[in-house]
Amino acid sequence: MKFIFTCVFLFFSISTLFAQQQAQGWLIYFGNTAFKSSPLSIHHELQLRDYQLGGDHNQTLLRVGLEYAAKPWLSITGGYGFIYTEAENSPNNPFNEHRIYQEALLKHGVNRFSIRHRFRLEERFIADKSFRGRGRYGLFVDVPLTKADLGKDAVYMAVYNEIFLNISEDDNLDIFDRNRLYGGIGYKVTNDLGIQLGYMLQHVEQKAGTNHVLLSLHHRMKW
């Protein structure tokens, strides 16, 4: 309960801090359903993104993938994503994107640091645009703050940086697509359920950086 009040306090503190820079709000669910005695699992994900902290829808993202645990430190995933996007304010000018992706996730630890390297390749089919690809590399680090591990009741710090690079024959499209830098605080409700509240700075192409408040749920289920 204390953690919930802390999250609420941090949410409004961050909101106030970036009020004049129009902080954007993202609500995210990351899920993984594992099968007993099988290296296979299903990734399922929902993201609701807003141009404000609420009230001006930006994007809805649905992603599902089949994950294979090749080694304890290596998993490989292939999947599909559907993205619905609207323009800021009005008119909304909505459009859809269908996305196929492949990724490799490498995990290791250094002392108390839990480190993940994610390499992702995307094939993007955007309405009224030519086909384009994109490569992504993300470095993710979780550090327990109140316990020696990331088990039940642990409060932890989560940071990551992810860079996106376009793969296209379009000379008008820059190689650099965007970069996301994130820092947040998480709490493990159970060994398989965690919640995070954090701040992300995103730079898209040559535009000025935008501020984002992220509230995310991280859930692992076993059948």
Image (cartoon, helix red, strand yellow):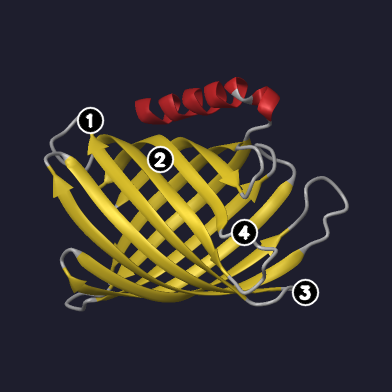
Asked whether residue 154 appears in the rendered view, the answer is: no
Asked whether residue 168 appears in the rendered view, the answer is: yes
Question: In screen coordinates, is 96 left or right of 16?
Answer: right
Counting residues from the N terminus, which is met first, the one under dot 4 or under dot 2?
A: 4
Percent x, y for residue 155? 27, 33
Position of residue 150 relative to residue 1, above or below, is below
Which of the labelled discs sits on residue 59, or is there none?
none
Residue where numbered disc 4 is placed: 174
Q: Amino acid at mark 3?
A: Asp
Crowding near the residue tagged with mark 4, few <14, some 14–19, many ≥20 C-alpha atoms within 10 Å = few
Counting residues from the N terminus, which is met first, the one under dot 2 or under dot 1?
A: 1
Percent x, y for residue 107? 22, 57
Residue where numbered disc 3 is placed: 128
Of 119 and 157, which appears nearest the observer? 119
Q: Nearer the viewer, mark 3 or mark 2?
A: 3
Residue at image position (70%, 69%) is: 96
Residue at image position (45%, 35%) is: 198
Classify mark 1: helix, strand or loop.
Answer: loop
Q: Nearer the viewer, mark 4 or mark 1?
A: 4
Residue where numbered disc 2 is placed: 196
Residue where numbered disc 1 is placed: 145
Position of residue 79 relative to residue 193, above or below, is below
Counting residues from the N terminus, which is met first, the one under dot 3 or under dot 2?
A: 3
Classify mark 2: helix, strand or loop.
Answer: strand
Classify mark 4: helix, strand or loop.
Answer: loop
Q: Amino acid at mark 1?
A: Leu
